[in-house]
Image (cartoon, grey):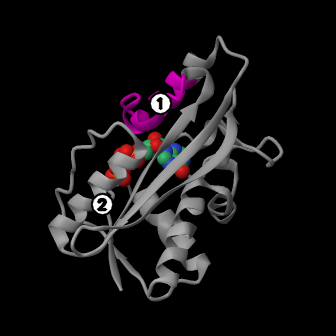
């Protein structure tokens, strides 16, 4: 079975493949959308944006498509950067700096990563959609080099003060929003094929 993974983010693809392999999936080939894949993510929620990406990848390929819309939601910032996480500032480092700066006045540093996944069939019909979350808080300094995005400042609940970027890939995948969302999708596929 071939599924197009509706992303331009290579980190997401790498994690997706590792999570699927760890789940024991060996009958799905994940492929990328064609060059130039750049849907307008003008939804107001993770759910809407993941549907936009999945439908566009399906329209371009005629294949079943899976999309991941994800981001970091920080309580003290009213859920920001949320769906704007990828565009919060120009570079990954600038996004971390802006976040740490914005949180300076606050004691409450609680946050969560959210990943909403939508799977559409070959005619663009929604087959399955659900989310995964990972709870934690924002550190005051960045540590760790693994992962991507906000991982160096995200302290994972229950991980003894380690940021997501200090966890190994396998440890991240076990607790991450992406791992939690994708395992739901893979269970759906296993039950319906
Ligand atoms: P596609 O839309 O092409 O999939 P994107 O990176 O633009 O790629 P999103 O719009 O879903 O994807 O934005 C997700 C952003 O949220 C991502 O760029 C990071 O800044 C942040 N993010 C999501 N998952 C993350 C993770 O596991 N670790 C750290 N940051 C993450």
Q: Report which quarter residue 94 is drawn in.
A: top left
Q: CA distance from mark 2 to mark 1?
A: 22 Å
Say which residue appears at 50% left-offset and 22% top-offset. Answer: 98
Looking at marks 2 and 1 on the same chain, the residue that comes earlier in the sequence is marked by 2
Question: Which region is colored magenta?
Answer: 78-99
From the viewer's perspective, is residue 111 above or below residue 8?
above
From the viewer's perspective, is residue 37 above or below residue 96?
below
Q: Are marks 2 and 1 in contact (CB under 8 Å)?
A: no
Mark 1 sits near ligand 1, with its Cβ under 8 Å away: yes
From the viewer's perspective, is residue 116 above or below residue 139?
below
Whether residue 50 is visible = yes
Residue 58 percent coordinates (x, y): 22, 67
Whether residue 148 is visible = no
Around disc 2, counting alpha carbons within 10 Å, would you say few (fewer than 14), some (14 to 19), or many (20 or more)? many
Say which residue appears at 21% left-offset and 73% top-offset. Answer: 123
Say which residue appears at 47% left-offset and 35% top-offset. Answer: 82
Total marks placed = 2
Residue sitting farthest toward the top: 105
User: Which residue bears the numbered disc 1?
Assistant: 81
Q: Quadrant of the C terminus?
A: bottom left
Viewer-closest of 94 and 133: 133
Residue 95 percent coordinates (x, y): 47, 30
User: Which residue bears the numbered disc 2?
Assistant: 54
Q: Report which quarter residue 120 is drawn in.
A: bottom left
Residue sitting farthest toward the right: 160
Name the mark nearer the viewer: 2 or 1. Answer: 2
Of helix, strand and loop, which one carries label 1?
loop
Viewer-closest of 91 and 64: 64
Around disc 1, counting alpha carbons within 10 Å, would you say few (fewer than 14), some (14 to 19), or many (20 or more)? some
């Amino acid at each position: 079975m071939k599924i197009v993974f509706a992303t331009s983010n290579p980190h997401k693809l790498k994690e997706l493949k590792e999570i699927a392999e760890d789940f024991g999936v060996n009958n799905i080939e994940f492929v990328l959308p064609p060059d130039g894949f750049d849907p307008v993510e003008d939804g107001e929620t993770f759910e809407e944006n993941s549907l936009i990406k999945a439908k566009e990848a399906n329209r371009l390929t005629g294949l079943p498509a899976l999309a991941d819309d994800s981001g970091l939601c920080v309580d003290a910032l009213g859920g920001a950067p949320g769906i704007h996480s990828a565009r919060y500032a120009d570079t990954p480092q600038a996004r971390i700096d802006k976040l740490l700066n914005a949180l300076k006045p606050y004691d409450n540093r609680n946050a969560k990563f959210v990943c909403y996944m939508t799977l559409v069939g070959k005619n663009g019909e929604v087959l399955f959609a659900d989310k995964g979350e990972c709870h934690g808080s924002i550190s005051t300094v960045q540590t760790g080099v693994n992962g991507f995005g906000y991982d160096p400042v995200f302290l994972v609940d229950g991980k003894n003060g380690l940021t997501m970027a200090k966890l190994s890939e396998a440890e991240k995948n076990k607790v991450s929003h992406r791992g939690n969302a994708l395992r739901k999708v893979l269970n759906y596929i296993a039950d319906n094929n």
